[in-house]
Image (cartoon, rainbow, N blue to C red):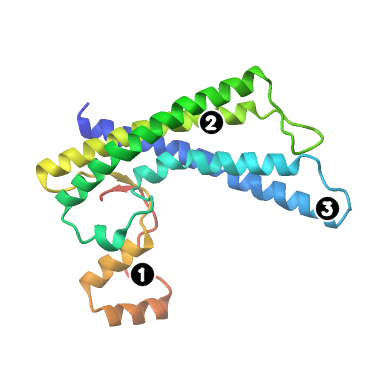
């Protein structure tokens, strides 16, 4: 198994976890709708909807972190970064990973494990509702997220090193593409004013892909 296969394998793991927990949004929507109907239509608010909703949202938010990192989707100063050569992009990313990302992730994992372990020993329950549902299983997601982010961070560092050596970003697994990237690519291939008129007329970007899985930066 080559190094690129390992990198893409970890990308797939991050994608699987992110997509699996994305279903939390369906459950969250159902809980919120049920609570609204019961509260305003039947005057019988639930005692558990608030706890369930913030745990579902927290799980969705945390477990999407490694997925977003694998898709190069976290927020950065793109108005500067996009104008750098790939080698300079990789150098900047590498410095930021070493100085900020890995120290923060290690602290997150260590403190998250301690936080979850103490919660388990106390059989911690929510203090926000009368029923007081058990919440320590939810807190064990914190160190799990730390491990996933650590793995994906190592992958990104390897990509930075390879880019510095070769001058080009290696391929990455990509099942989605930012709308901004599609617009910039289309604008580079044709007249921007003509492109704007076509988008306004058709409502989509010419050559837009349907989200099939592919590789690329």
Residue 214 falls left or right of residue 89: right
The residue pinned by badge 3 equals 39
Q: In the picture, which quadrant includes the N terminus?
A: top left
Q: Residue at x 19, y 57 (%)?
A: 84
Q: Is residue 41 above or below residue 54?
A: below
Q: Residue at x 58, y 30 (%)?
A: 139
From the top left corner, tell me how far across and down residue 18 is, in percent.
47, 40
From the top left corner, tell me how far across and down residue 92 is, in percent.
22, 47
| Residue 36 placement: quadrant | bottom right
Circle number at residue 205: 1
Q: Earlier in the sequence, mark 3 or mark 2?
A: 3
Q: Earlier in the sequence, mark 3 or mark 1?
A: 3
Helix, strand or loop status at disc 1: loop
Task: Decide: few, some or many residues near mark 1? Use Cα within 10 Å; few <14, some 14-19, many ≥20.
Answer: some
Task: Decide: few, some or many residues near mark 3? Use Cα within 10 Å; few <14, some 14-19, many ≥20.
Answer: few
Observer-nearest of 85 and 212: 85
Q: Residue at x 40, y 33 (%)?
A: 105
Observer-nearest of 72 and 114: 114
């Amino acid at each position: 198994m080559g190094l690129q296969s390992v990198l893409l394998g970890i990308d797939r793991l991050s994608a699987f976890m992110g997509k699996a927990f994305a279903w939390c949004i369906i459950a969250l929507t159902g809980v919120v709708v049920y609570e609204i109907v019961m509260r305003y239509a039947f005057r019988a608010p639930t005692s558990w909807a608030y706890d369930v909703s913030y745990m579902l949202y927290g799980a969705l938010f945390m477990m999407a972190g490694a997925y977003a990192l694998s898709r190069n989707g976290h927020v950065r100063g793109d108005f500067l970064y996009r104008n750098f050569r790939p080698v300079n992009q990789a150098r900047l990313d590498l410095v930021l990973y070493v100085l900020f990302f890995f120290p923060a992730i290690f602290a997150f994992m260590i403190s998250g494990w301690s936080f979850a372990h103490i919660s388990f020993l106390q059989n911690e329950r929510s203090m926000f509702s009368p029923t007081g549902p058990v919440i320590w299983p939810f807190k064990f997601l914190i160190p799990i997220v730390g491990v996933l982010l650590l793995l994906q961070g190592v992958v990104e560092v390897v990509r930075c090193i390879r880019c510095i050596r070769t001058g080009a970003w290696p391929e990455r697994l990509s099942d989605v593409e930012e709308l901004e990237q599609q617009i910039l690519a289309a604008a580079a291939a044709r007249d921007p004013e003509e492109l704007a008129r076509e988008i306004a007329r058709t409502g989509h970007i010419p050559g837009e892909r349907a989200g099939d899985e592919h590789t690329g930066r």
